[in-house]
Image (spheres, rainbow, N blue to C red):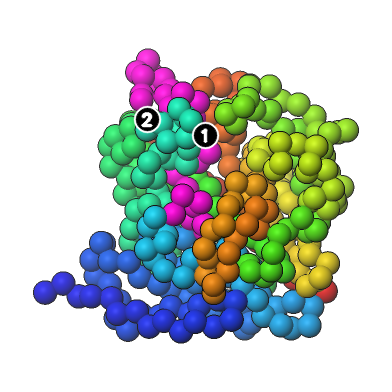
Amino acid sequence: MMSKVVLLFCFLPGFFLLSQAHKHKHSNNIAFYELERGNFKLNFTNYGASILSVVTPDRYGNLADIVLGYDSIKSYENDTIYFGALIGRVANRIGGAKFTLDGKAYKLPANDHGNTLHGGSRGFSDVVWSVKSYKKDSHIKFNYNSFENEEGFPGKLKVSVTYKFFGTNKLAVQMIAKPIDIATPVNLAQHSYWNLRGHNSGDILSHIVQIHGSHITPVDKDLIPTGQIQPVKGTPYDFLEPRVVGSQIHELPGLYDMNYVIDKQSKKHFNKVAVVRDTVSGRKLELWSNQVGLQYYTSGMLTDIKGKDGAIYHKYAGIVLETQGFPDAVNHPTFPSQIVNPGETYKHYMVYRFTAS
């Protein structure tokens, strides 16, 4: 008889603790895991290899959960917001829901105004991953085997994501993918929504953001890149120096949802991508990555979403920082390629540092 996962739920202010009475043995079982080191605590589920909560102290030592999410797994299964999820096979948008590779045309699900968004109708955020390795005070590693023609993408792909403590207040994320038989595009992303004052504290318009990207890839009305690369200087997209999120947001169509070209910092493998600060709580999030792009999204499309702890998430409730390849790169030969061939390995690294002062 198949072993079942028994979940014990204990709802606490700002986050929820989910623990297993028995470990699952069947890939269809959805389970919950916790990483804890001191007063730094995170919860995950193997549904979408998702981050459910991140609990950190403010400048006074008070704990709060600083990522948006849901109370129930059913809500994650019905989610269209991608709260905390691991996105793939290709994150962001593919124009016209199609591309050509090695002379062959591929048609994908058109789940966003005639385009493909975040891997299609059932991307990596909507599948159950297996757990390869788990140690509560150290790390958790999720694996997924993407089958040939999944959501229209060519070939088979082995994927893993590891969330790992790095020091006392850092979280490292490692995304690895290997094609099995033929070349395929790969662009994975982590899609957590951050509110450093607490997930249920209102909007993020007073947060201060710095983005180490002096150029953007401008988009058309459907958020598909035009193929151009433009400087941010003198525009509302200029966050080269720290700036309040809401200071120029109303000069745009009501939100930020743009890919930034990350500036290379000397010859370092990792580049500092962004810094977010909240002056009320004193919390600061710093992000490093080896990727060429960052999708900066201020959740301008959220409308009365029922979240965890009874929270209702409105417009601007969180900030999403998706390190990634450029959107629609499969249709823009001048963009850095996302095609990975058999024998090659896709490697995507991120490091978050959380402090408060």
* Badge 1 element: strand
Marking on residue 93: 1
Give the residue at the far top of this rendering: 103
Crowd band around label 1 with a 10 angstrom C-alpha radius: few (<14), some (14–19), many (20+): many
Q: Amino acid at mark 1?
A: Arg
Residue depicted at x 62% and y 27%? 221
Give the residue at the far front of this rendering: 304
Quick check: is 339 in the magenta stretch? no
Q: Does 78 sit left or right of 347 as displayed? A: left
Quick check: is 87 in the magenta stretch? yes
Residue 167 at what x, y percent from top left? 65, 72
In the rendered structure, which disc, 2 or 1, sits on the residue that comes first in sequence? 1
Marking on residue 108: 2
The answer to whether one can see residue 179 in this image is yes
Q: Are marks 2 and 1 in contact (CB under 8 Å)?
A: no
Q: Is residue 140 above or below residue 327?
A: below
The answer to whether one can see residue 345 in this image is no
Q: Amino acid at mark 2?
A: Leu
Residue depicted at x 42% and y 24%? 98
For the C terminus, the quadrant is bottom right
Is 127 in front, or is 324? 127
Magenta part of the chain: 79-108
For the N terminus, the quadrant is bottom left
Crowd band around label 2 with a 10 angstrom C-alpha radius: few (<14), some (14–19), many (20+): many
- For the residues labelled 2 and 1, the Cα–Cα distance comes to 11 Å
Q: Is residue 117 above or below residue 303?
A: above
Residue depicted at x 33% and y 58%? 128
Q: Does 212 sit left or right of 299 as displayed? A: right
Q: Quadrant of residue 251?
A: top right
Q: Is residue 261 above or below residue 310?
A: above
Is 31 in front, or is 161? 31
